[in-house]
Amino acid sequence: MAKTIIVSNRLPIKIQKVNNELVYQTSEGGLATGLGSIYKEGENVWIGWPGLYVENKSTKEQIVDELKGNNMRPVFLTEDEIKDYYEGFSNETLWPTFHYFNNYAIHEENLWEAYVNVNQKFCKEIIKVAEPGDTIWIHDYQLLILPQLVRFKLPQSSIGFFLHIPFPSYEVFRLLPWRKELLNGMLGADLLGFHTYDDMRHFLSSVSRLVSLSHTNGQVDVSNRKVLVDAFPMGIDYDKYHETAASAETLKREVRYRSSIGNSKLVLSIDRLDYSKGIPNRLKAFELFLRNNPEWRSKVSLLMVVVPSRDKVERYKELKEEIDELTGRINGQFGRLSWTPVHYFYRSFPLPALSAFYRMADVALVTPMRDGMNLVAKEYIASKLDKRGALVLSEMAGASKELLDSILINPNDLNQMVEALKTALNMPAEEQEHRIGNMQASLKKYNIHHWVKIFMERLHYIKEKQKRLSTQLLDDQIIDDISERYMNAGRRLIFADYDGTLSPHTDDPSTAGPDKELLQTLKILAKDPANRIVIISSRDKTTLQNWLGHLPIDLVAEHGVWLKEADGEFHTIDKIENRWKYEIRPILEDYVGRTPGSFLEEKDYSLVWHYRRVETGLGELRMRELTSHMKYLAPNMNLQVLDGDNIVEVKSLEVNKGKAASRWIEKFSNADFIVTFGDDWTDEDTFKAMPEHAITIKVGSAPSIAEYRIQTYKDVRKFLRTLANNGKLIKEK
């Protein structure tokens, strides 16, 4: 039975050695909670590092046996791997870069090598347990290249990947020396999930500009399959936090804490020690608030919890010292015997204690400089049973896209933060209840379980779409079978696109024409009275006539506008209107003017904007702008917009290659062998027009409804020469 394999850097359990004994502590994190219902079922398994360096072989075996009963499988890391892969590349290269602190990032080849080696170690563990039909869900920045490693070993696997931190803009991401390797690694997945649309957009921009892969509606064409990229804002276990807030343990703690702190209003700050969290700015803003609003002194305190993290690392050590200094300064400047401005705790707290803090707090101050989501903001809202309180939230946190009833601030603007604090503390009770109520309704609906469900549904969707668009690579055996059908047929139709199918793509007219080899192959095929050769091209009729008009073959120009049988003249498929060109041409000319290297080609019944020679990235950007612009105008003008290989073509909706091909299929309905070749998505219309017994062959790796796939135009030529050679397979030297 198919199972789900969850893979993350850490297992949902932490193992520690206490008095030389192993102690297992279950994680209460959001991911562990959300995926708990999955990995604990049946044969499902969670693969990850147990958080402990283990050298002794018998201890490793003990851990493996213990975890096996809980559907977990450990990946053991050496001390060097922990230092170089986890603390090094993951947290000193990727973490600062992805959080826009690229000036903190270090770029060392040995750290990258360690990162690759550990990802390979994770891959080996997956391969040991993975079987056909399994779903593999990989998580976070420590395992960015793992999807591709698994894809190489298990090409048919269903692989999902979710990034729990922000994905930076192209200008920041491109600073990484291993940027292409990281992107290609991620694209090994079938579904890539991010917290926000902005993260998704930044990723797709880097994909376009760094690895030159096209995408449409969040779907990237990668090696004969589509990869779906989407935003899935991660939720929390709403019921868990809501119920914990009402528990007897939480209420008992609240009474105890409140009696210690007094009756002053409470502003809550909870964070892990990290420069991305904006803790110093938060303290400076609170200091400025007290300075500018003396009436609030002795009436409000900041309860600040900072969870220890990597404080042996120099940068984190310096951050801790800055926080200590700011806290001391504020308490020394404003504190009284009866009032402490900042209650500062440098340690972690159990959930009931955190829940009591959430209940007590009049304001939650969540102001990261950059954050993937920030679940503290959501936990605070879920814990407000009386719907009293206010949330001041950084617009740089992913949660800001959902918690629209919070007070949004720029964490770099101290004055704005001060005003937001003042607004929050003075907010009327009715407004608090309205805002909290709205946010609770959203969090309850879009909880962690909803997040898991939607992600899995989208992964299933893209795998089904891949199956529909999957094509089988032509091998010698299939070619032999097709050749036999060819030899036994009495009437044959052979359809072929030109550019990219019979000849390489090029914008240079001097090199685009057919060479002797192609002309000779077509001449031999056309000489057979049983064959009818039809070239269906986007080229204009004059060009096709000059190149191929002397051969006894049929020609279709401009996607089907012009038709010509071997012994006839070109004529239009129908009466076609082209007055629309007067309105559309100036728009395309404007894009030419704004895009160096692009040019406009005018055909009888279409206009084509070429961008093959445009700077990588700029061409794709302009293409998307132009396509969007044209698709807005097209429906009202009965036009079709085609995004081809480095072109955007605008033509009449009444014309496509499939309609043209249908003319020959109707006229030669007795054909018992039909084969068609095409490389562009415009050739999909031809494939769709083919009868069931036709053989459809896609050139290249892009997804297609075609039955078979062939690598390049050279392979098409070899195949046609095989047919011309009475079906005998041509063996290349």
Image: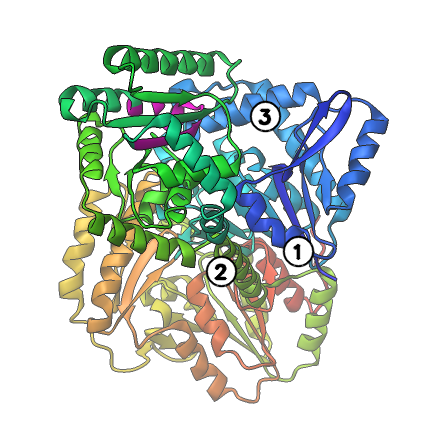
Residue 729 vs residue 190: left or right?
right
Is 276 magenta? The answer is yes
The residue nearer to you, when weighing 512 against 119, is 119
Q: Tag 1, which secondary structure?
A: loop
Position of 676 relative to 260 (above/below): below
Residue 44 vs residue 137: left or right?
right
Q: CA distance from mark 1 to mark 3?
A: 29 Å
Residue 256 vs residue 484: left or right?
left
Q: Residue at x 31, y 79 (%)?
A: 571
Q: Residue at x 38, y 50 (%)?
A: 385
Identify the image quadrant of residue 469: bottom right
Residue located beneath label 3 in the image: 86
- What is the quadrant of the N terminus in the image? bottom right
Q: Is residue 234 visible?
A: yes
Residue located beneath label 2 in the image: 679
In the rendered structure, which amino acid carries the disc numbered 3?
Answer: Tyr
